Image (cartoon, helix red, strand yellow):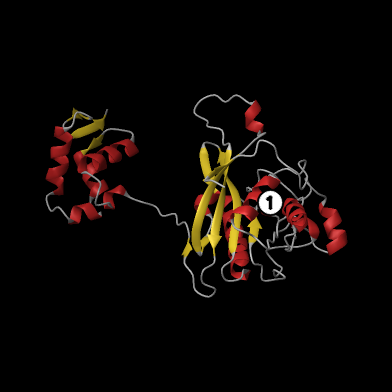
Amino acid sequence: MKSIVSYPERGEGGRNSYRGNCSPKLIDDIIDQYKIRSLSDFMVGSGTTEDVCSRRGIDGTYLDLNRGFDMLTMDIPERPENVFWHPPYDDIVVYSDEMYKAQSIIDKYGFDPRINDLSRCNGWEDFVRKMNYCCMKQFTAMEKGGRMFILMGDIKKKGKLYSMLLDIAKPGTVEQIIIKAQHNCVSDSRSYAGRFVPIVHEYLLVLRKDSPLIFNIQMAKNVEGDMRDFKGSTWRDIVAAILEDAAKPMSLSEIYAKVDGHRRCTTNPHWKDKIRQVLQSFDIFTNVGRGVYTIA
């Protein structure tokens, strides 16, 4: 197994008609590479992991929402040695009432799978919150020394990339990230105009549980940045950004007001002189009136 894997031929296991299923050959490679003796999958979908492990004589527990197991509300019934997890990619493929009938789960198990279906979340933030809850729940259930293999992808919506790899919680030791090429994608048969770049890969994140009680967790955090408070921002860039943000000519007093009170002012008592110097020194700024400037 190398850091990039590709399986043009899917292999045997699970149902290829079950959208979002992965190649059984990936499970085979994981078993061989990491000398797996036990591998559980609590979102097994159409049963790919179960079929491969059965063929290989590997034991494990195989559950899914479509089998009556709700990861968000039910306890994991064992302490698995290793876990393979292939969560939904937000709402790219909706499962309950699309891949299987929700009513059949209601009739058989007494709960509505649509309520906690990760493919039916209320936006990206809700999906990430529930995804990370499930990730931590499975990781904490594993035995010491176990590995968690998470197959995930990126999503493009309205010109913005939503990356599961960036936003997922990463407990324990990040041992490996493997790039998996995708085949037979919907995008393969389409032509795209403009700057759109089709996504034709997934990630296999390998997390190792070296410590059972206390461990490191890498988590993404979104913060709002103001370049007027960054040490690395030049006065040229600060003034240019103020004029770009205004999208109209501004007087010196208006520019001063946009800077006053921010961190950069505290490090230079002559910041007003510096702003005037910048406006007169760079040709990206144009004087369009007495003390009034715009940006080219």
Question: Number of marks in the image?
Answer: 1
Q: Which residue is identified by label 1?
A: 120
Taking the image as shown, residue 22 lies to the left or right of residue 195, namely: right
Above or below for 83 versus 252? below
Residue 230: x %, y % from top left = 27, 51
Q: Amino acid at mark 1?
A: Arg
Above or below for 24 versus 282? below
Is residue 261 among what the camera can see? no
Above or below for 105 versus 142? above
In the image shown, does 98 or 239 lie closer to the viewer? 98
Residue 171: x %, y % from top left = 52, 63
Residue 36: x %, y % from top left = 64, 60
- Determine the image quadrant of residue 277: top left
Above or below for 78 versus 94? below
Q: Residue at x 49, y 70 (%)?
A: 215
Residue 257: x %, y % from top left = 24, 47
In the image shown, does 128 or 212 lie closer to the viewer? 212
Q: Residue at x 49, y 28 (%)?
A: 195
Q: Residue furthest right?
A: 107
Is residue 145 among what the camera can see? yes
Split into 4 quadrants, where in the image is the C terminus? top left
- Regarding mark 1 in the picture, which secondary structure is present there? helix
Taking the image as shown, residue 61 lies to the left or right of residue 219, namely: right
